[in-house]
Amino acid sequence: MEPKSISRLIVVCIFSLVCSLGLAQRVQGQTSDNPDTNPYTISLDVNQVVLDVTVQNRDGGFVSGLDKSNFQVYEDGRPQAIESFHHGDVPVTVGLIVDNSGSMRRKHSQVVVAALAFVQGSYPQDESFVVNFNEKTSFGLHTGEPFSNNISQLRNALIQTACAGQTALYDALAVGLQHLKNGHHDKKVLLVISDGGDNASQYNFQAVLTMAQQSNATIYTIGLYDPEDKDQNPKVLKRFAKISGGECFLPSSANEVINICQRIAKDIRNQYTIAYNPTNATRDGRYRPVKVAVRAPGHDKLLVRTREGYFAPSGTITSRQEADRSPEHVPSEEGTP
């Protein structure tokens, strides 16, 4: 694609994304069980489980206007009582994980388009960071700036690295998940742009999958491929998105990136956040599967996405953050993708 075409695509992408998000911000209400609380803060007990939930109709449209009575949470197949419910816009801590390996050289312009569009759609209260990676990982922002909401700074963080070398996707995901813990907002998101291949990481798939299962982050992935790519692995990108309640996108052309960025931004801003105190209070460090069901009059079949489960606290750990660090057991997988 010619540079002029890329520039026009970026402008169109940014314009359409900002317009759609601006409209959503004006019309979307703030609802909570406790209207006196700060709308940007969800007050939670340290033992509560928090789920960000996306609800869509059969046409893919986001379903708004639901309340707590429409939701039912199950843990290990047992119903749980919802203690906290919120639907509305809250600030987000966002990590952009961008593949700059040699295999992405032909697609680098598409990567920049996607990432810039997503950044342009952020709100002033959001905080973001960039992890660039090939066989090594590096933070895009200057040292001493762990997060930023400055568009120029984030743009520079995205375009400063040339595409070369091998691919350490798992290492980059590990760095991103770890850095999210330093964020100031309860709601956390990773956007990963890659071909899904990995041939240089010190971490392996299972280790990073466990880290993702420990995290509250929702992971969205965009896979960009060439037919000649030998290391491409879309199964990896699909898996990380699925276990976290996010979505994986595999566009066939740069033109699709605009709609993808709009969709991810809307998804983040239209989620329901619910929390519950598990009926199983045993501190066994085990992974517990979670399911959320939604029933709403006037709606037929609804698609519900949220993370697949969480690790219970273990031992004498007293905070959710500490509990997330060292689960004792990992659920079995049907092999590494």
Image (cartoon, grey):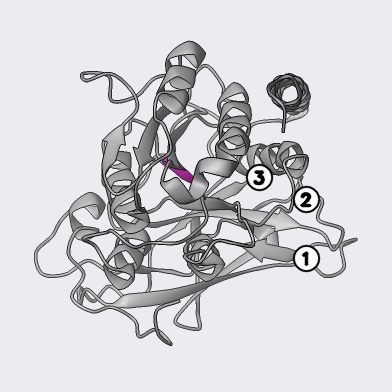
- Up the image or down, 46 lies above or below 14; here it is below
Label 3 amino acid? Asp
Label 1 amino acid? Leu
Residue 45 visible: no
Helix, strand or loop at mark 1: loop
Single out the residue that lies furthest toward the right: 298
- Up the image or down, 43 lies above or below 145; here it is below
Quarter of the image with the C terminus is: bottom left
In the displayed structure image, the side of residue 261 where residue 145 appears, left or right: left
Which labelled disc corresponds to residue 267? 3
Which labelled disc corresponds to residue 85? none
Q: Residues within 10 Å of mark 2 (few under 14, many from 20)?
A: some
Residue 244 located within the stretch drawn in magenta: no
Q: Name the mark nearer the viewer: 3 or 2.
A: 3
Helix, strand or loop at mark 3: helix
Between 152 and 267, the one lying in front of the other is: 152
Residue with the mark numbered 1:
302
Between 199 and 38, the one lying in front of the other is: 199
Q: Name the mark nearer the viewer: 3 or 1.
A: 3
Label 2 amino acid? Val
Q: Residues within 10 Å of mark 3 (few under 14, many from 20)?
A: some
Q: Which residue is drawn at the image coordinates 50% and 83% (left, top)?
A: 77
Q: Give the Cα distance between marks 1 and 2.
A: 9 Å
Q: Position of residue 174 (x, y in %)?
A: 29, 52
Residue with the mark numbered 2:
63
Between 186 and 259, the one lying in front of the other is: 259
Q: Main secondary structure of the magenta part?
A: strand
